[in-house]
Amino acid sequence: IGRRLTVRDIVARKGKDPVVCLTAYTTPIARQLDPHVDILLVGDSLGMVLYGLPTTLGVTLDMMIAHGQAVVRGSTQALVVVDMPFGSTQESPAQAFRNAARVMAETGAGAVKLEGGREMAETIAFLVSRGIPVMGHVGLRPQSVNTQGGFRAQGRDEAEAQGLIDDARAVAEAGAFSMVVEGTVAPVAERMTQAVSVPTIGIGASVACDGQVLVIDDVVGMFMDFTPRFVRRYATLGPQVGEAAAAYAADVRARRFPGPEHTFPARSA
Ligand code: KIV
Ligand code: NA
């Protein structure tokens, strides 16, 4: 409230200016990104990127709340959206509301995001009608890696494509103010974007989407275990951190650090 972007500002971008989104998980990174983006997404990708988990399935609501608080503290302009982790929404609309309400109340974020298509439409409508703005997440859904058969591009055959378009429509009709479209072949991402009146925010879903999102650690070269095809890397911070540590270690071992300028002298007489 005040000068932060709201979900209404995001909806109004449809058919106009692209929506710019990056993930953020910490206060210092949020501070750097806030002047440049419309949305800071506290993604459950933090499980893999920050905690070294093999998938996002082990991320907890308490982890999302802690990092959501950090990102809200580090930003003043962007809309902050916090991911609902695996297991926190799927049981029932009531369970999803209880957990999403904790996220909203304890972090001060402006919205939550939850993965799912037609099967989550009732839950999305339940949350939105009770005061919690929801960003959808359709196409490739990392929380469903075990049922989707690994991480593979979605929409390669027409039956699957039609299902994705139906998902996008259902999520929009349920009241989501926007939706992430992940890992979806270009022509289908374009059809999904045309099918809904709220912005689609693509990741690995072509330039046809109404906005784009990437994981910040991929963008700055901090997470380099693997770099998906859809990432453009703008910096190489990971190796720079290693180089800094190596230079520090060499200085300490050679007694070149600390120098006189880093040392408290005795009070001069
Ligand atoms: O968790 C995440 O970072 C996400 C984005 C990649 C959309 O869901
Ligand atoms: Na996510």
Image (cartoon, rainbow, N blue to C red):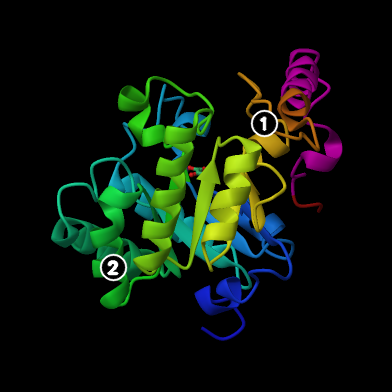
Between marks 1 and 2, how big is the CA–CA gap?
A: 37 Å
Residue 10: name its quadrant.
bottom right
The foreground one among 267 and 225 is: 225
Q: Is residue 179 above or below residue 262?
A: below
Which residue is denoted by mark 1 in the rendering? 222
Q: In this view, does 146 lie above or below 260?
A: above
**Marks 1 and 2 in Cβ contact (< 8 Å):** no
Neighbour tally class for label 2: few under 14, some 14-19, many 20 plus, Cα within 10 Å: many
Q: In this view, does 50 lie above or below 123?
A: above
Q: Write the residue at 71% across / 27% down.
A: 238
Relative to 82, 220 lies left or right:
right
Q: Name which residue lies at 64% across and 41% down.
A: 187
Amino acid type of disc 2? Ala
Would you name the residue on which mark 2 appears? 125
What percent of the width, then of the height, locates residue 202?
Answer: 61, 47
Residue closest to the eye, 87 or 263: 87
Assess whether residue 146 is covered by the magenta stretch.
no
- Residue at the front extreme? 158
* Span shown in magenta: 242-266
Predominant secondary structure, magenta span: helix
Q: Which residue is drawn at 52% across and 51% down?
A: 180
Identify the amino acid type marked 1: Met
Q: Which of marks 1 and 2 is in front?
A: 2
